[in-house]
Structure formats: structure tokens, C-alpha cells
Image (cartoon, rainbow, N blue to C red):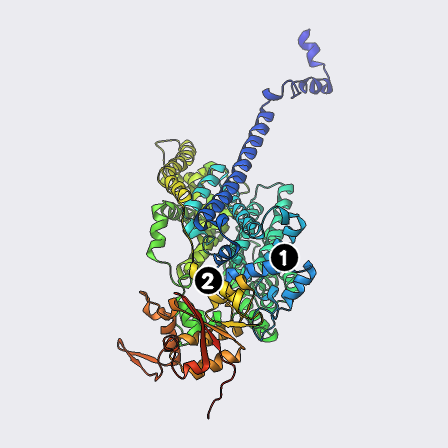
Amino acid sequence: MVLKHEQTKSPYSFSRNRTKPRCNFRQLFRCPFSDMLIQRFAKLFFGCLAAVTSGMMYAVYLSTYHERKFWFSSRQELEREITFQGDSAIYYSFYKELLKAPSFERGVYELTHNNKTVSLKTINAVQQMTLYPELIASVLYQASGSEEVIEPVYFYIGIVFGLQGIYVTALFVTSWVMSGTWLAGMLTVAWFIINRTDTTRIDYSIPSRENWALPYFACQVAALTGYLKKTLNCSAEKFCYLLVSASTYTFMMMWEYSHYLLFVQAVSLFLLDSFALAQTEKVHEVYKIYLFSLFLGYLLQFENSALLVSPLLSLVAALMLSKCLQMNMKKGTFMSRLLKIMYIYLVLTITVTLNFLLKMVVPHKENEHLLKFIEVKLGLNTTKNFTMNWLLCQESLQAPSQDFFLRLTQSSLLPFYILVLIICLFSVTQVIFRRICGEPLKETVKLEDGRIGERPEIVYHVIHTILLGCLAMCLEGMKYLWTPYVCMLAAFGVCSPELWMTLFKWLRLKAVHPILLALILSMAVPTIIGFSLWKEFFPRIMTELSELQEFYDPDTVELMTWIKRQAPVAAVFAGSPQLMGVIKLCTGWMVSSLPLYNDDDLLKRNENIYQIYSKRSAEDIYKILTSYKANFLIIEDSICNEVGPARGCRVKDLLDIANGHVVCEEGDSYAYSKYGRFCHEIKMNYSPYVNYFTRVYWNRSYFVYRINTVISFQS
């Protein structure tokens, strides 16, 4: 009877009784679902805490190292400013001018109509030198009321160090998103700091544009990594999309060369989409972000024509035009899949054609010297031009040295990166072959599948790191873009069970359960690596922070003091561009050239004024200097008497080659100039040099000459 009574119960009463065991407040910690939520929340909380802590510790580390290196807090203002060299000095000098202006609006106007920096030249410094970081820093300094709390220089470098902390945090998050464990983020940070010499140039030039811009690019890459994931809910997808949009535009505003790096990224997404390894809609949404950022950047950067003729705009426009054709080729037929090769060719053809047409229509002078440099670098042309040869001699524009690869190998970064890259690359190749054969991608890839190459965010990073690596193999300066992502990809790989499972699938491992072994190795290998790195490199880092280094340049301090006390306010100084940047920062006096290499006129000025170290007559040098209204000439003994292993790359050697004063034939050099080297001859104080120049100051490193105003030239 009991059974009969239970069978006659209505479905409604049965379901109501079944709902009683659901979670309530008392049973919260005994519910499997709530346990899962607590575990996810704990993982997210501690991961975010570790990411933020890593960034903050790295910022503190940079600040401490900078203080130990320069004794910054114990220096006078002039001695602090001398630590900014070359173009860094120029950027910081404009930050000082903004703070001294009676109002922010007046300061911006003076920068956009600047005629107090370079003689006989009015420049829009905000556009030409990309001074948006300085604009933001000055606004924050004044709006936050920091005038009475912190000195301007500490506020400025503090922002840069804080951005570097964000940089590290973004790399942490990227490797965490890819691997699923924040242990990968910790390993990424460890490799980044240990290889700091090759991951960032923050030691050499704090205010450089890339130090301001690359943290935003790292945030964009982290957001793009999450955006490309298949298993992403709607809210997270919208958040990633907004972050990609904001960081892309900010990155473009911070660095004049940002659109070139975004072009490399766009090529990676183009290849990813061409093989149908990602959702086409998402990729094209990123293309729209590029277009919006270029358009807004063009308007807010005073109609910067460089953005209109950039390869990024041409590529994105070509991709948009080819969008319909690409969608038709994804119908699934074998012939349409073969036509993907034609599609790639079509996009490249349209890109080159559009870029050529835009350069014909849009008036521009965008880095023409870079194209000539690439021709000479690739061996397509030869030149005796001083500027081209000087650029070729710069360390950052040469192929990386063996020491670079040795350092990466000693920290175990390079071997693990190569291992991870090979596994991912082979897996991606397998996926592409399956797609060509008509096999569809799985909606969800499980751990036991061993198909890490089917994850679009992984494929994107593989393509991106290969492209950046090819550039880094040609130019050592590109290593600062490539090495951070080497750290991230290597850390992701050794911490990812999917990568180990992919390897075991190929090896057909049967002796041990492959999933269990993959989980064990994804924890054990990074732990062993981390322990070995801690044991070997942590004492070095602590020693680096504990040692008090000494950076003191008394000769430069004496020179700047003399200029501020003795030189007329309206005086114009001529000399090497690097020294002119320091003079502009420390004294505020007008100069005849600047250490900037994105303007043809400034490059020509630099070459002309460098003639003071050539074998030219006193009359020739006098005519060059007076054409720029220079009143004082500064000879640097370090350049005039420069010695070094790279004999053909010394300034005086490059000038002799450009002027035809030295001809090299079969290893022998022949001099063809009837004049001695100007920087040597002027020190002798004999005619005709004393007729044109009068020495007014000298020390061990610098010789300052006043350029006489009344000279009679006989024809």
C-alpha cells in the first residue's frame, strides 16, 4: 500500500520534494556547486593578487635600482637632469616647460608653435616628437596637487616605472589566460626580470616613447588573447573588446612607430583568419578597432599623414574589401579551400597597390630615410651618405650578437621557448592540414584530445612571435619587442597540461596515464625551473640592489653651469645632437640641432654640424654654423679623439668617407683632403681658425668657442 501511495503522487509534488536538498545557507560549504565556485573565486583572487603584486614589486625594483645607480635623491637638480641623455633629455625638457607655463593651454600652444628650441625653425613639438605622455604627466602632476608633495622629476619617472609594472602584470595575465594557471605568470615575470637587459631598455632611456607605449600594447595583447578564446562568456567578451579598443588607441598615441607594430599584429590575425582558425567576426571586429584608432589618431595628432600612408591602413582596407570573397571561400568545397592561396595573394596585392596610391595622393615625408636604410641593410644598394652609414653603425640596428643568445640560454629561457614553439608549430600545422582536408574544428577542445593547435589564441601567439622573432634576428633593437613574448610563451608552454598532452599524443605514451603525467609535469617542470632560477639569479639581483654605483660627470656639470652663468640668453649653441639635447634640458638655451631621426631637415642639420669633426676648412665650418645662426660651438674631445674596435663606424671615419677625404682600396686608405681635422686644428689657436672662432671656455672634455660675427671673406 505504501508503494501504491507513492506511485500515485503527482509529478509536481515529486519535483517539489526533490528540490529540498538544494543548497541553502547552512549547507553552502557542503554543496559541490558552491565548492566549485569557491575554488574558482579563490583561484581568481590569488591569481589577480599575484599579478598585481608582481607588477608592484617590479616597479619598486626599478625605482630602487635607479636610486642605487645614480644616487638620485642625493643629487642636485642639474646633476639629476644630466642622467637624461640624448632624446630622453628632449622629452623631459618639454615636460619641464609645460609645468613652467602659466596655464596648460598656454603650454600646449607654445609646444605646437615652438620656435625656442631649434634655431630658425618653428616646429609642432607635440606632433613631431609625440609628446602626449608629457601632456598627460603634466596634467596629472598639477591636477593631483603633487606640487607640494613630490618633485616633478620623481613624479615623471614614477609614472614610467608604474607603467613598467603594468607591463609585467599584463604579461603575467596573458600567460595565465593561455595556460589556465597563474604559475605561468610567475615564471613569466621571473624570466622577464632575469633577462631585463634584453627585455627592456628602461635602464638607458627612461622617457623614451617605447617605455611609455609598450605597457599599453601588452595590455592590448592580453585582452586580445582573452577575446580570441572560444570558451568566453558574453560579459567577458565585451570587457576584452573594450580593453582592446582603449589600449590600441592609447598605444597609437604614445609612440610614432606604433602602427608598424600593429601592422605585424594585423598580419598575424590575417593569417589566423585565412586558415579559418578563429571566428571571422571577432577578427574583423579587431580590424574595425584598427580603423577607428587610425582615424581618431589622425584627427588628434594634427592630421598626421604618416597614419594615412601606413601599411596598417592599407592592409586593413584590403582585408575589408576582400571580406566577401573570404566568406564565400569558407563554404566548404575543396576548390574554395584551394582558393585561399589566391585570396592571400589578392589581399597582399591590394595592400601594396593601396599603399602606393595613398603615397601618391597624400603629401608626406614619412621616414623616407627608413626605406633607404632597409635597401642598404638588405644589400640592395650601397651608399656613402653619412646619415645612412651612421644609422647602420648603431648597435640597435645591427644583427643581434652571440652574447644575446648566450644570455637567453644561460637563463634557460631560449631552450624552453624553442621546445614550446616547435610543439605548438607542429600542432598548428596539423590543424591547418586537417582544415584543408575538410575536417571541421572542434567546438571545445578537451585535455585528452592533445590538440593545442586548435586554440585560436595559441595560434595567434605562435604566428606573432615568429614574425617578431624574424625582425629581432635582423635588428637587435627589435629584441625589446620580441623577448618579453618569448618569456610569456615559454612560461605558458611548460605550465600548460595541453602542451604536454599534445606531445604525449605524438609519442603514443601508454606506460603511464598521459593525462596524469601531463598534469604532473605542468606543475613539476615550472617548479624546478623556478627553484633553479631563484637559486642562481636571486643573489645576483639582491647584490645589484645593494651595491652603490656612482654616476658623476663633473665636466658636463661644469659646462652647464658655465652656460647658465656666462652665455647670453639669446645664444644658440652648436655641437653633437646628443649634447644639444642635454643643453636644452639643463639650461633652456636654443640649439642648432636635436637628437631626433624622424625629420629630414633635422637629419640634414645633424650631418652638417657634425662636419666640425671632419677634414674641412675653417671657412667651410664657419659658413655652416652661421647659416644656422649659431653663436657658440662646442667640441667634444670624446668624439674628436674617438678610438674603438669599430674603426669604420667612428663619426670622423664616416664623415671622411661621405666627403671623399678617405678612399679605401684593397684594404689601404688614402687621404685626399688638404686640410687637417677641424676639431684638432681649432685647438692650435693659429690663423685662420682664430679669425673665425675664439675659445671662451674649456675643461677636460669640452672646448667652447664663440663664433665671431664680423669676418671679411675675400673672393
Query: Is there CB contact under 8 Å for labels 2 and 1?
Result: no
Q: CA distance from mark 2 to mark 1?
A: 26 Å
Mark 2: few/some/many CA within 10 Å (<14, 14-19, 20+): few
Q: Nearer the viewer, residue 236 or 433?
A: 236
What element does badge 1 sit on?
helix
Residue 514 drawn at (x, y percent): 40, 34
Q: Is residue 184 above or below residue 246?
A: above
Q: Nearer the viewer, residue 275 or 580?
A: 580
Residue 212 drawn at (x, y percent): 55, 54
What element does badge 2 sit on?
helix
The answer to whether residue 694 of the structure is visible from this angle is: yes
Given this view, does label 2 or label 1 mark the residue nearer the observer?
A: 2
**Residue furthest to the top:** 1
Callout 2, which amino acid? Answer: Glu
Q: Which residue is mark 2?
A: 558
What is the quadrant of residue 331 in the picture? Answer: bottom right
Callout 1, which amino acid? Answer: Leu
Residue 591 drawn at (x, y percent): 53, 70
